[in-house]
Image (cartoon, grey):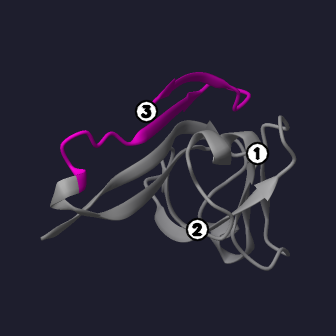
């Protein structure tokens, strides 16, 4: 039997921009993507702590060490610059993979710099 589990989370990231004119997605500092094991074009869930909105889109890399967390396209109407969000991914795991399973948990400061990473 397979289970769907949290694969990774970037916790309490600050939205640095919301760009309605961009085609879509969320641009995330490449360093954050790597630490969270999120691939370019991977589906992500975004949960806005400020307003409770939840949405799905895909991640694209932004400039490494920039602190960028930019919500693009239609999603920018649901999330505002300065909002605090959680970015999460999920994976499908076989029961044999569950014994030592741990998601990648990335905690960031107010400038989206990594302050703690658990894996």
Residue at the image point whose x is 49% and y is 67% from the top: 55
- Residue to which mark 1 is pinned: 29
Magenta-highlighted residues: 97-119
- CA distance separating discs 2 and 1: 14 Å
36 in relation to 58, above or below: above
First in sequence: mark 2 or mark 1? 1
Which of the 4 quarters of the picture holds residue 13? top right
Residue at the image point whose x is 18% and y is 56% from the top: 96
First in sequence: mark 2 or mark 3? 2
Whether tag 3 and tag 1 are in contact, CB under 8 A, the answer is no
41 in relation to 82, above or below: below
- Residue to which mark 3 is pinned: 119
60 in relation to 11, above or below: below
- Residue 47 x/y as whole percent: 47, 54
Camera-side residue: 19 or 27? 27
Instruction: Choose mark 2 or mark 3, whichever is in front.
Output: 3
Q: Is residue 111 magenta?
A: yes
- CA distance separating discs 2 and 3: 19 Å
Residue at the image point whose x is 28% and y is 43% from the top: 101
- Residue to which mark 2 is pinned: 42
Quadrant the C terminus occupies: top left
């Amino acid at each position: 039997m397979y289970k769907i589990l949290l694969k990774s989370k970037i916790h309490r990231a600050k939205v640095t921009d919301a760009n309605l004119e961009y085609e879509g997605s969320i641009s995330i500092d490449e360093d954050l993507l790597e630490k969270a094991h999120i691939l370019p074009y991977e589906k992500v869930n975004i949960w806005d702590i400020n307003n409770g909105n939840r949405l799905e889109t895909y991640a694209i890399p932004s400039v490494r060490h920039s602190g960028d967390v930019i919500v693009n396209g239609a999603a920018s109407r649901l999330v505002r610059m300065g909002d605090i969000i959680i970015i999460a991914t999920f994976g499908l795991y076989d029961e044999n993979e569950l014994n030592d399973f741990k998601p990648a948990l990335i905690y960031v400061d107010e400038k989206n710099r990594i302050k703690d990473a658990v894996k």
